[in-house]
Amino acid sequence: MEEDDEWELCNDDGFVYKRKRRRIDPSPAAADNAAAAALAAENENRRRERKKKTLLKLKTKYENEIRQWDTLSNTLRAMQNAAFQQQQQQQRQQEQERASEEQTRDPSSLPSTSSTDSVGGSLLDELLLQVETQEAIIQDISNLCDVAESVCLKREEQFKRSLFDLPIWASPVELMQALCDE
């Protein structure tokens, strides 16, 4: 049995013969495999670290963006609530003024057309109040748009800066030297 382990059968284009098995020295091959495995593991660890850093940067960027949008959203909500409360307060004041005017008037001395005039006047007051409220809302939204535009301009400037900071833009002489050297 041991003799069979030392010999191997070879078939060379139909010519069959026995030859001694070649013994491969495992120490150099194993060392190369171990070094390659260690290098592959090290490369994988570096790749994971780069990926982790990149993901953490992306996470921070998105968290900052979410905070900005939350701030804008809360500001808009606060402005809407303030406009709504202002509108309600003005309506209450108008109703109180109407009530006090009606109490001071003498119903027998007023002509019959005054009731239609007061209805038209109150309708006009309500419309005026709505227009003022809408104007305040439009102004607030305009302010929000200005903030959003400034955020976009800042990001655009950062992007441009990252492109201009590339070493290729250093100077034309250095660029030509680098191109000629290669």
Image (cartoon, rainbow, N blue to C red):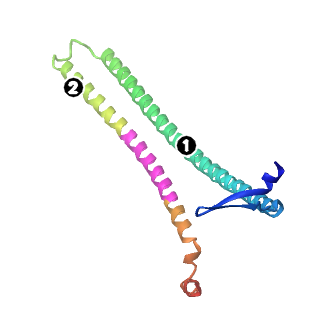
Identify which amino acid the numbered label 2 is placed on: Gly
Q: Is residue 16 left or right of residue 106?
A: right
Magenta-drawn segment:
135-155
Residue 78 appears anywhere in the view: yes
Please tell me whether residue 167 is drawn above or below residue 117 in the rendered image: below
- Check the image and report above or below for 55 versus 102: below
Quadrant of residue 27 in the image? bottom right
Q: Nearer the viewer, residue 2 or 111?
A: 2
Q: Nearer the viewer, residue 48 or 41?
A: 41
Q: Does any portion of residue 37 appear in the rendered image?
A: no
In-image side of 153 versus 33 (left or right) = left
Left or right: 89 as drawn, with respect to 171: left
Mark number displayed over residue 120: 2
User: Which residue: 16% across, 20% down?
Assistant: 113
Main SS, magenta residues = helix
> Which is nearer the eye, 161 or 167?
167
Q: Assign the C terminus to one quadrant of the image.
A: bottom right
For marks 2 and 1, the one nearer the N-term is 1
Q: Nearer the viewer, mark 2 or mark 1?
A: 1
Please report the residue visible at 55 percent of the width from the left and 43 percent of the height from the top.
66
Residue at left offset 23%, top offset 22%: 119
Image coords of residue 16 (percent x, y): 65, 60
Q: Which mark is residue 66?
A: 1
Horizontal and vertical percent position of residue 126 = 30, 28
- Kind of residue sitting beneath label 1: Ile
Element carrying mark 2? helix
* Residue 146 versus residue 27 in the image, above or below: above
On the image, the x and y values in percent for residue 5 come to: 79, 52
**Looking at the image, is 140 positioned above or below residue 98?**
below
